[in-house]
Amino acid sequence: MTTAPEAPGTDQVGSPRLRKEDARLITGQTNWTDNIQQTGMLHVAFLRSPHAHARITSVDTSAARQQPGVVAAFSGADFAGEQGSLPCAWPVTEDMALPEHPPMAVDEVRYVGEAVACVVARDSYAAADALEAIDIEYEPLPAVVDMEAALAEGSPLVHEGSGQGQGSNKAFVWPFTAGDVDSAFEGADVVLTRRYHQQRLIPAAMEPRSVVCRPDGDAFTLWSATQIPHILRLMLAMTTGIPEHKIRVIAPDVGGGFGSKLQVTAEEVLALLLARRLRKPVKWTETRTEGFQTTHHGRDQIQDVSIAADADGRIRGLKVDLLADMGAYMMLVTPGVPVLGAFMFPGIYKMDAYSFSCTGVFTTKMPTDAYRGAGRPEATYAIERIVTELADEIGMDPVELRRRNWITHEEFPHTGVAGLTYDSGNYEAATDRAMELFGYDDLRAEQRRRRESGDPVQLGIGVSTYTEMCGLAPSRVLGQLSYGAGGWENASVRMLPTGKVEVVTGSSAHGQGHVTAWSQIVADKLGVPFEDVEVLHGDTRVSPKGMDTYGSRSLVVGGTAVVEACDRVLEKARKLAAHMMEADEDDLEFTDGRFTVRGTQSPATSVQEVALAAFAAHDLPEGAEASLDADATFDPENFSFPHGTHLCAVEVDTETGEVRLRAYTAVDDVGTVVNPLIVDGQVHGGLAQGIAQALYEEAVHDADGNLVTSTLADYLVPTAADLPDFTTDRTVTPSTTNPLGAKGVGEAGTIASTPAVVGAIVDALRPFGVQDLRMPCTPQRVWRAIADAREAARSEGGQR
Amino acid sequence: MPHIRVTVDGVSYDDQVEARRLLVHYLREQLGKVGTPVGCDTTNCGACTVLMDGRSVKSCSVLACQADGHDITTVEGLSSDGDLHPMQRAFHENHALQCGYCTPGMMIAALDLLRDNPDPSDDEIREGLEGNMCRCTGYVNIVRAVRDAAAVLRAQAAAPGSEPRAGVPPQVTPDQEPARQTASGGAAS
Ligand code: FES
Ligand code: FES
């Protein structure tokens, strides 16, 4: 059993400190981008395409300019010379199609909602009103909505002549093979093939996107509701040609991201250009409907998966063939999302061979990009679903089948078939704990009873034993995968003369509680009070170096940078303290913030006293500087691999198709836990989003490419009434790839839960012959699956 | 332009407003009460929830001129003299917020819920907060926070000589409830 005290030998780290962030947030003292006011600030509204695909034949903004309060109105053509093309940082193959993506469309629009013109006015009401006075004409072109139809011979093209090999909607093909897949399948007793659909999802952070840009002479300050102030600054400079050092990007309070604010958007680029052209601060904030149409979407894959196994359940090989919907353009990491997933399809299982191929497809829809988990939920869904089906096929308990195939805890570190080296884990411990908490055997017994009695409400149990690659990412690996940047993180730690500490982190939080967690780490390292630590982030002028927040990387990479910066501060402090105490450095001990001379009763010197002495600089040793600060950049050697076992019990009313979540147990192993309160919160929120994919959410387009689910009334973000309480627990198997032993937790719940829920529903309906369900598993779909299975059974019976 | 008199977090205002201006935009843009955010354009998210005469309304579905003559409490008016309201404290202590965007509306909706039902079950809390969305927390800790706040508020109400604080809805049991006042179209539930 690996359940251990949550950070042995430390005080702050591992304790459920209440968050420092809350004081402002619960009293309304917030600083959302949309709260920002600037003297003379103008408001921007965008006119957006009502067509999924059309040629723009004319735009006339002159009447809009005559409207009261309107300062300016522009079409895409007005910015054609300076707006550049929105960046894609991840060209996954050399021959990937990378079509131009102007922030405001000039000649052609390729999704509903694409910006075609804008109005700048004294207030947001006036700007919105004047949009109606813009005269624009389109020549509609055929929409391309369905991925398979898009690849068919003769399909209309999203981009004339820019598809792979020209004349196609195929953006790229990314293949990967390890081991001898053919012989793994040829010699198999069982081969199962399934097609899984990852529906399109909308990230739906509660804070809408918003941007404010203020010109300051030839420089600009841009506030944005973004996860990535540093990457954004770089990309804005590269896109517009405005020098990087003339742009300051600030991410103030940011109301959730989930990947949707890991983007360089048209509106950010245009806010910068409008501020430059008008010499006035400008603001734009999306409406929710506008956001659903134009903030990037997630998932949207068709997965053809085959698994080969021996009769005793040993997995021999796996084949995965993906179609991934890129939407109309390649945005920041659009093509990289399915590629990131490529390494995760084998999950926690040993096998001889694995092949993967992903075809990126253009359609006339909003581009897809990172959404909580980004590639890994898709992979985990496919492997966990098909492994469960394999267990059913050979008549084995789904947990037992997993036990026969997973990496055992003695086998770590373990290099799997996809080439990743999993550093640590204990799948047995997490699974045993989850089964115990869940009452697995009792629920199975109840399931049998209900089946035997023909209860109209059937019980199903879903199992998900997931792992994920977190801590993005070793820069070297990112380079090998053709990603345009590194994966390091930077921190600096400054002791002020009064003994207070400023910590600057390049990782920019939007709800994750970095301020609290980083304070805990620093308090322990330097032996200072938790309250004495201030954490600064999210402003390129304050934290000049950073790689920002995504991919469950902040603690693993950014937290480690903080640890290393603290170590350097202590190294300096030790030299100074030795000098102050007239002792040899090697004789000093440092505990609880105090230096003492080993084996003597001489008085201690606190780190705060050292900080003051450094500042005063009256008597510094040779070569010492008059400050006590240091910075560090950490680039991980490897990813980290959180894992866990999630068990879900559902009750399915076979007469109405209604699904009730009866119990959900998650036992996660995220390594060392800095703050259990925050970790639990991340798991809860992650579960809600993963469950939402299984049961509620789907971005639906009609045949003309209109987003049908364009409001919160149509796109079902679950409320409290739609979700149950969760049972959560942890095992702790520290990561060996970073000094904290942390693995990352931001995405775990989302990755694990979707297959657990769908698996449970399918399990409930097995007696009817149901083997799969399309997500989201709405009552209508569940009822239809039962009806179809009954119908099939009847006609089969009739033939006999 | 219509002329309104409205009290917001204990301060009275006398203002000209555009007839079509939403209360939430009046609060945010005209009064600088930016603690109350906007999360949608279809009255679904509840981020904008405020109290109007002690009952919760979605301030994106009330016109500023409908607030004429009414008393509005926003999240900024919940604490008094630096003392957190028990609901605020419960949200903090239960880690019931992450990004905090939904939090003002969630706390205010929860206060209204407790006014009708001072001792709700978890299911009743979940049902009662159906008009407020949170994308971060999965609601588990929000339910716990509301449960804790309910206990504190019940104890306070039971304490002899307890006085409801300014700007904060008094705890009344349903049978003592005064006539419900809502501007048309403004009910949050
Ligand atoms: S802003 Fe969403 S309900 Fe008011
Ligand atoms: S805390 Fe982020 S939306 Fe609720």
Image: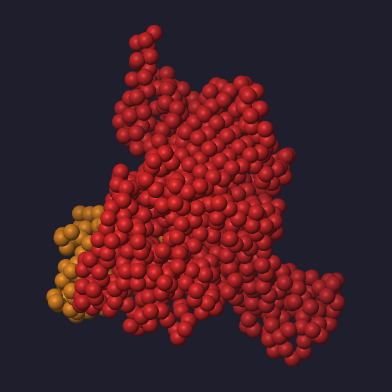
Chain colours: A red, B orange
Question: How far across and down, in percent of the image, does residue A594 sit?
Answer: 73, 74
Looking at the image, is B136 positioned above or below residue A393?
A: below
Question: How far across and down, in percent of the image, does residue A579 sit?
Answer: 81, 82
Would residue A783 be found to the left or right of residue A564 on screen?
A: left
- Considering every residue shown, the one lying at the far top of the view is A800
Quadrant in the picture for the C terminus of chain A: top left
Q: Please count the marks in the image.
A: 0
Which image quarter: residue A71? Answer: bottom left
Quadrant in the picture for the N terminus of chain A: top right
Looking at the image, is B8 positioned above or below residue A345?
A: below
> In the rendered image, is residue A5 in sight?
no
Looking at the image, is A371 positioned above or below residue A625?
A: above
Would residue A422 be found to the left or right of residue A788 on screen?
A: right
- Considering every residue shown, the one lying at the far left of the view is B2
Residue at (67% x, 73% y) in the render: A631
Task: Please tell me which residue lies in front, A215 or A379.
Answer: A215
Would residue A563 be found to the left or right of residue A172 on screen?
A: right
Question: How far across and down, in percent of the image, does residue A536 sit?
Answer: 55, 73
Residue at (45% x, 64% y) in the render: A85
Residue at (72% x, 45% y) in the render: A413
> In the rendered image, is residue A494 in sight?
yes
Which image quarter: residue A514? Answer: bottom right
Would residue A419 be found to the left or right of residue A685 on screen?
A: right
Residue at (57% x, 25% y) in the render: A191
Task: Please tell me which residue lies in front, B29 or A261.
Answer: A261
Question: How far across and down, in percent of the image, does residue A287 sit?
Answer: 31, 62
